[in-house]
Amino acid sequence: MMKKTLILFGILSMFVLQADEKTQAYTIEIDVKSTKANGKPWDISGGSPDIAISIDGKRLQFLEKCRDKYRCSIRFFSTSDEWYFEIYDKDIMNDDLIGKGNCSEGDSCSLGLAKVKIVEL
């Protein structure tokens, strides 16, 4: 019984290791235009956007380093090399959509009022 358990554990470990090997670390570099499409500032006080992002429908936790920035980089992990991004200006009441669309590893993409570049680490 012990031998069968060890063999099963070994086989399962191989699958887990193979899945982990496919997971890569990436950085998305985001550059946002200085105003909204209507020419108004991103924030009521005239400030820059608080950049937040959703990748393939999953909203990432907001990072303080992206508050009041036109440029921000965010690290994420994925088994894919192409993603659907939604980039927002995080506000108290309603978030403003900055841009959305697909982008692949190594590409520079224009997504609405943002340019993004995805780099594998």
Image (spheres, rainbow, N blue to C red):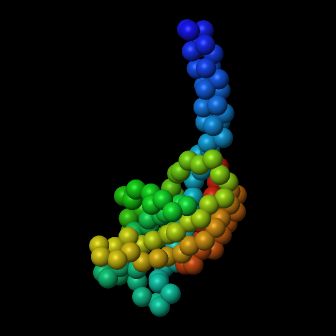
Q: Give how far across and how far down residue 15 sits, in percent.
A: 64, 31
Residue at image coords 42%, 78%: 96
Question: Is residue 26 something one can see in this rendering?
Answer: yes
Give the side of residue 98 with respect to residue 117, left or right. Answer: left
When the figure is inspected, residue 77 is found, relative to residue 96, above or below; the finding is above
Q: Give how far across and how far down residue 12 sits, in percent.
A: 61, 26
When the figure is inspected, residue 121 is found, relative to residue 7, above or below; the finding is below
Count of numbered marks: 0
Location of residue 93 by image quarter: bottom left
Give the side of residue 95 with respect to residue 8, left or right. Answer: left
Residue at image coords 67%, 54%: 81
Q: Give how far across and how far down residue 90 sits, in percent.
A: 38, 70
Q: Give how far across and how far down residue 111 sits, in percent.
A: 59, 74
Location of residue 117 by image quarter: bottom right
When the figure is inspected, residue 56 is found, relative to residue 92, above or below; the finding is above
Residue at image coords 54%, 75%: 99
Q: Quadrant of the N terminus?
A: top right
Q: Extreme right residue here? A: 106
Q: Extreme bottom residue here? A: 38
Q: Extreme front residue here? A: 1
Question: Is residue 48 something one can see in this rendering?
Answer: no
Give the side of residue 83 with respect to residue 97, left or right. Answer: right
